[in-house]
Amino acid sequence: MIPLKRRKAYDAIFVWLSGLVLFFSLLTLFSLMMSLLIQGVPRLNVAFFVSFPSRFAEQAGILSAWVGTLTVMSVTAVVAVPVGILAGLYLEEYASKNFLTSIIEINISNLAGVPSIVYGLMALGIFVYQMHLGQSILTAGLTLGLLVLPIIIVTTREALRTIPTTMREAAYALGATRWQVMRDHTIPYSMGGILTGVIIALSRAIGETAPLITIGALTFIAFLPSSIMDPFTVLPIQMFNWVSRPQEEFHQNAAAAGIVLIGLTLTMNALAIYMRYQFRKRIKW
C-alpha cells in the first residue's frame, strides 16, 4: 500500500510534467506560427489573391489554388458527410449485431488509420483508370471523401451512443416508431457530436497533399476550372511547389499561402461550430 504522502507527491510530479510538456508544445506551435506570419504577412495583398501562379515570385498568386481548394472541399463535403452520417446511423440504430457487422465495424475503424497515400493509389486505379474520371476535381473530391468517410462514421456512432437508452425507451413506450425516435430525438440530440466529427474530418481533408499528387493534381495551373471535370490544384500543392524552389521569395509566397490555408481551415471550423451551437440551442432537455 503506497502511503498517502507519496501518492500526493506522485500526483504533483505528474501534474508538473504534464504542464511542462504542454508548455513546450505550445511554445513550439507559437514559434512556428510566428515564423510563418513574419515571412508570409508582407505578401498578403489583393494581387496575391487574384493572380495566377507565375515563374516570377513577385507576380505569383494563389487564385487557382484557393478556388481549387474550395471546390474540392465542396465536392468532398457533398460526398462524405451525408454518406458517413447515414452509414453511422444505420450501423448504430438498424444493423443487427452479428459477425458480419462486427467485421464491418473493425474494418471501418482500421480504415480511419490508413495512410492517405493508400487512398491516392486506390483512387488512381479506380476513379482515374477504371471509371475514366480523369485528373479532375470530381476525382479529388471522391478521393478525399473516401479518406474522411471512416472518421465521420466512427464519430457519428460515438455521438449516437451518448444518447441515454431511457430516452429511446420512453419514446417507444409512447408509440413512436424507430424512424420517429431517430428523427425527433436521437439525431437532434446527437447532432453536436456529429458536427464535431465532420469538423475533424474536413480539417484533415483540406490539408492533404499525397493522395492529390497521386491522382495527378497540377502544380502549376493558370486558369480557373469551369466544371468538376476540369484539372485542378489546391493550396497545399501550390505551397509544395514554391517550397521546392531555391529562391527565398517563393518561400515567402509559400508562407503566405500557408496563412491563407490556416485561415480557410479556421473559417470552415468556425462555421461548423456555429451550426453546432445553433443545434444545441434549439434543443430542450
Image (cartoon, helix red, strand yellow):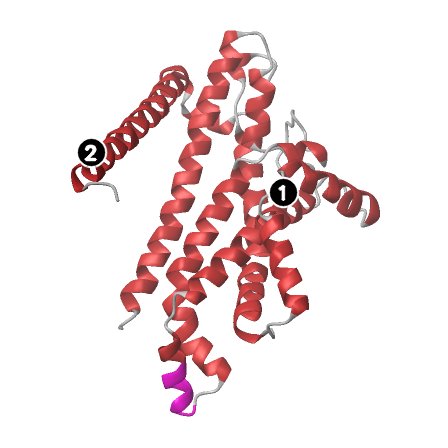
The amino acid on which the numbered mark 2 sits, given as a three-letter code, is Ala
Image height of 204 relative to 146, above or below: above
Label 2: element kind: helix
Residue 84 figure quarter: bottom right
Query: Is any part of residue 227 visible from this angle?
Result: no
User: Residue farthest to the left?
Assistant: 5
Q: Residue at x 44, y 39 (%)?
A: 265
Residue at position x 63%, y 38% from top? 115
Residue 238 in sight: yes
Specify the label residue 114 is tagged with: 1
**Which residues are drawn in magenta?**
169-175
Q: 99 and 205: which one is in front?
A: 99
Q: Is mark 1 on a helix, strand or loop?
A: loop
Judged left or right of residue 161, residue 231 is: right
- Report the front residue among 282 and 135: 282
Comparing 260 with 7, the one in front is 7
Residue 204 falls inside the magenta stretch: no
Residue at position x 46%, y 47% from top?
200
| Relative to 118, residue 28 above or below | above
Q: Main structural element of the magenta stretch: helix, strand or loop?
A: helix
Q: Distance between the residues labelled 2 and 1?
A: 41 Å
The quarter of the rendered structure image containing the C terminus is bottom left
Between 269 and 231, the one nearer to me in the picture:
269
Residue at the farthest top position: 247
Foreground disc of the pair 2, 1: 2
Q: In which quarter of the image is the N terminus?
A: top left
Picture coordinates of residue 160, whole percent (x, y): 44, 66
Name the residue located 74 percent from the left edge and 39 percent from the top edge: 121
Image vertical order of residue 185 relative to residue 44, above or below: below
Q: In the displayed orientation, state which residue is furthest to the front.
A: 1
